[in-house]
Image (spheres, grey):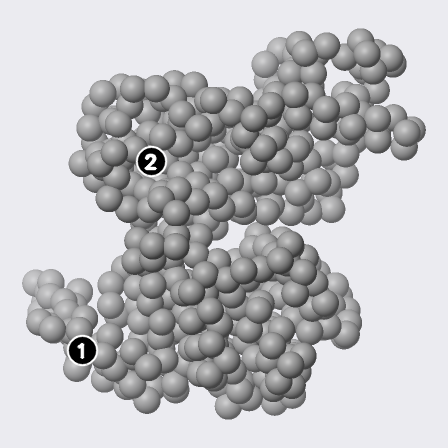
Amino acid sequence: MIFKPHAYQEHCINRILETKKLGLFLDMGLGKTVTTLTAIRELKYDRFEVRRVLVIAPKKVAEGTWMREKDKWDHTRLLRVSPVLGSQAKRIRALNTPADIYVTNRENVVWLTDYYRNGWPFDMVVIDESSSFKSHNAKRFKALAAMGPHIDRLVELTGTPSPNGLDDLWSQVYLLDGGERLGRRYTHFRERYFQPGKRGADGMVYSYEAKPGTEEAILEQIADICVSMKAEDYLQFPDLTSHEVPVELDTKSRAAYRELERKMVLELPEEEKEIDVASAAALSNKLLQLANGALYDEDRKVHEIHGCKLEAFLELTESLAGKPVLVFYNFRHDRDRILVALSGRKLRVRELKGPQDEDDWNAGRIDVLLAHPASCAYGLNLQQGGNHVVWFGLTWNYELYTQANKRLHRQGQTEKVIIHHLVCAGTRDEDVMAALTRKEHAQEWVMQSLKARIRMIREEG
């Protein structure tokens, strides 16, 4: 695919090329990954200014997003990507594989810095979701900060640089400038821009509040090394945009999916013409359940197959940093597993059941609202409560899909609506996603793609 950057993307690419250490604070859906890959390609192959690039990302993003994004565009396909993931032996092997970009998850940062020490080989580092480095006490921040003198170029990517307050900015900006703009020590930064808030009976300060004018003062200090863009600021950005989040199955989960898929296909009638709409729909539903991570048996008991999509979902909600999100699930076991996964987090989670839930969502009293698309495809007005939709489980029913999205994308919505799809690689999810992008004749495409998948499995024996 040929990449035709929007004006704001061209601006960001040029800023990466011109500014050696840059914070790129772009809303999710504005194309941070392809923008950064384009700049890397020019720096590596046109300007010869970088040799080895390290990308640090959330685990599921590291597993799939960067590799798939670079393969998507004609101009970035030449980039060689080596995923530094898995066991220590696999990580070391990946580090010794010739590549342009090495992608690892943030949990490996401390190990990576210990592994190389003063022999740090990456002259450019990209931190995907830099808000995960917001804590100045975190080991990952301290480890990466120690490598600062060895890093010539650094790009920080996030849509939410200060999810919990302006004090989240200090460590991220420190990685860019070594403390030049906001102070070399966090305590100095806090004293300058904040004042004591809540105190205990013993006089101990438990929280700090920003002094008047703090936000303007901080933004003025960092304006030369940070680009901040919100989706609603750009006319080129459509009112509704689609965002695919690739989910990679681990080796064990992939094998389990393949075996169950093969078993289901081989149980079908041998003659392809006997595969009617009803049996195709039943098989599709089973395969979609598998992609989501669990499966009903004949007695309606739930068997969990993998947690890969659930893990990607949690990373996605974390990256939204508290922004309200409407989550569509396909099967009840999806809903149940999501509720369990979110139970230990400081989020107000609710299932959409009635008018009170609708009112509370629109009033901003819900962070995560779970809904089945069939139960809210028509009539409900949810546009005042948020602008992010996550499809945990996909549906091939195009009318249901579009009507569900219109719960947020409708008159009265004041922000751009972003639809996130969790798409499990190598599974039925990809077929359904392709059908939805075709819009018309989606059901026919679903049937044809299923027949193609059946034919492929039978030929493999």
Residue for point 65% across, 65% down: 76
Residue in front for this viewpoint, 7 or 105: 7
- Quarter of the figure with the N terminus: bottom right
Q: Residues within 10 Å of mark 2 (few under 14, many from 20)?
A: many
219 shown above or below 381: below
Q: Along the horizontal axis of the image, is 328 left or right of 120?
A: left
Q: Residue at x 42, y 65 (%)?
A: 7
Q: In which quarter of the view is residue 204 placed?
A: bottom left
Going by the image, does 83 lie left or right of 28? right
- Left or right of 287, for residue 57: left
- Residue 348 seen anywhere in this rendered image of the structure: yes
| Position of residue 316 in the picture relative to residue 79 (left or right) | left
Quadrant housing residue 308: top right
| Residue 73 badge | none
**Which amino acid lies under the numbered mark 1 shown in the image of this protein?**
Ala
**Kind of residue sitting beneath label 2:** His
- SS of the residue at dot 2? loop
Picture coordinates of residue 205, whole percent (x, y): 14, 69
> Which residue is located at x 66 percent, y 26 percent?
445
> In the rendered image, which residue does mark 2 sit on?
409
Mark carried by residue 217: 1
Residue 181: percent from left, percent from top: 29, 85
Q: CA distance from mark 2 to mark 1?
A: 35 Å
Residue 325 in percent (x, y) is at 35, 40
- Neighbours of disc 1 within 10 Å: few (<14), some (14-19), many (20+): few
> Which residue corresponds to the image point at 69% horizontal and 47% vertical from the top-left?
250
